[in-house]
Image (spheres, coloured by chain):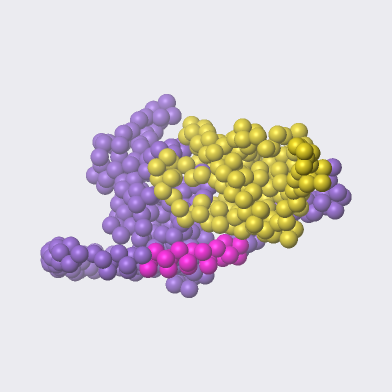
Chain colours: A purple, B yellow
Amino acid sequence: MFKRPLYIFCALALLLVVVFLILQSTWGTRMKLTVGSLFLPLFGLSSTVETGLSKAADKVTPRDVLLKELEELRVANQKLRVLGQQAQEVFLENQRLRGMLDRQAQAPWRVKAARVVGRDPANWWRMIHIDVGARDGVTNNQPVITAEGYLVGRIGEVGHARAQVVLVGDPNCAVSVLVQESREHGVIAPATINPLDASIVELGYLSRNSILKPDQTVVTSGMGGIFPPGIPVGRIIDFQNIGHGLYTQARVKLAMTISKVEEVWVIQP
Amino acid sequence: MRAVHPALLLLATYVAVYLECRVTFLRDLIGVQIDFLPAIVVYASLTSNLATVALLAFAGGVWFDSLSLNPTGVTVFPLLITGMVLLWFRDLILRDQPYARHILGFAASVAVPSLSLLLMLSLGAEPLLGVGTVWTLLVLGVAGAFITPLVFAVFDRVRLLFEFQPLEVPSFREDREIKRGRN
């Protein structure tokens, strides 16, 4: 039915794919970034169109709405200024006390703003694309948080102008966390796939005597070396003893909602 | 002119992969990202040759994987196998019938992600799986069943614009018309 050269063509294509799959760790990433850069014109075009539409929408926003928003921002700014002064005092006190105890001061975060430009087209991974890359100083494994400060994930692969963020709950992003109230340590593991609610993950490796309650806050523990401590991850929904009562597992509702994440901060050392 | 058809299919694949990455409102609504590639491969395998199908499977698979956490090349196999199976049985398929297009779209849209998952699991990757996967495959299948006839309709129309159409000779011939009446 098929001509011989076509068989050879198909065999070559399959061979090439097998080579890709075998050389996944070394050439795979590089290949992926190179091929992915073919989509840069489309990403750029859609960003330009979105910016244009946003500017056009700004121009037709009524003056009353703008004035109201300005007033709200002014009030919020004043509140934040007071909070900032208080935080500054606490920060100085913390530094003083750390100095007295001879403990190393925590390095302040340096953040880089980024916009979410896409999501993983496959249904079995949790990953987003952001519009910053190696040219902006982004490197592998840098933590990413939302504008509100909730944990999003970590940087996966980095291209020149684009990077992939592996989200919390993906099998490639394990996060060491602790329950803020009980100080119990655990690890966020991916839950089984739930297409209708992707914001639930499992908190495992908790001791069997863990004192847990629903609605307790889960934050990063700082262990593992990727995520700094204290970043809010989510809240506990429920928990159960598993492994014949040997340890406890809890379900955690993530603080960030993937579909609503539009802007993120990349934390840089 | 012969190159226009594969080029159009490649362009459609390129745009489809980008849209799957960029447009997510349906995913936010039903929790599943619709995949256009199986529908395009079904169309290609029923209307063009093996070279076009192989090129489409290769380019589409590699593009898809480049925007995903999939190992590079893992989507090429399922697309190519689906395309080749359809190409092999092309003469037995009632490709002009709408219900055949629905069924082929459903089957291809379920087969491609299932084969991708199997391949990934055999390569040692750990994708998110569970009871929800059944829902995902079902939605992908139903969406594919609806998309495939649309792909046929759109591409058939686009082909009309670029390709020479066979000249239709009407059966009416003036010299053989039976003249009635006395004149």
Q: Quadrant of the N terminus of chain A?
A: top right
* Main secondary structure along the magenta-highlighted residues: helix
Total number of numbered discs in the rendering? 0
Q: Residue furthest bottom?
A: A135
- Which residue is drawn at the image coordinates 70% and 34% (left, top)? B94
Residue B169, image x, y percentages? 77, 48
Residue in the foreground of this view, choosing between A147 and A39: A39
| Residue placed furthest toward the top | A244
Q: Position of residue A7 (x, y in %)?
A: 82, 49
Q: Is residue B62 shown left or right of residue A213? A: right
Figure quadrant of residue A69:
bottom left
Residue A32 visible in image? yes
Residue B24 sits above or below residue A102 on the image: above
Measuring 33% from the left and 65% from the top, which residue is drawn there?
A54
**What are the residue bounds of the magenta stretch?**
A33-52
Instruction: Identify which residue, A69 or A219, lies in the foreground.
Output: A69
Query: Quick check: B22 above or below B96?
Result: below
Residue most toward the right? A4
Q: Where the C terminus of chain A falls, by quadrant?
A: bottom left
Is B85 situated above or below A59? above
Would residue A158 be seen by someone viewing this image from the given angle?
no
List x then y, in percent, for residue B25: 41, 48
Residues B172 and A130: in front is B172
Was residue A81 drawn as part of the magenta stretch in this picture? no
Is residue A101 rendered to the left or right of residue A163?
A: left
Residue at image location 27% in from the left, 45% down from the top? A217
Left or right of B138 in this view: A257: left
Q: Residue at x 59, y 42 (%)?
A: B148
Rendering quarter of residue A183 = top left
- A225 or A54, which is in the foreground? A54
Left or right of B169, for residue B72: left
Residue B20 percent across, percent down from the top left: 51, 51
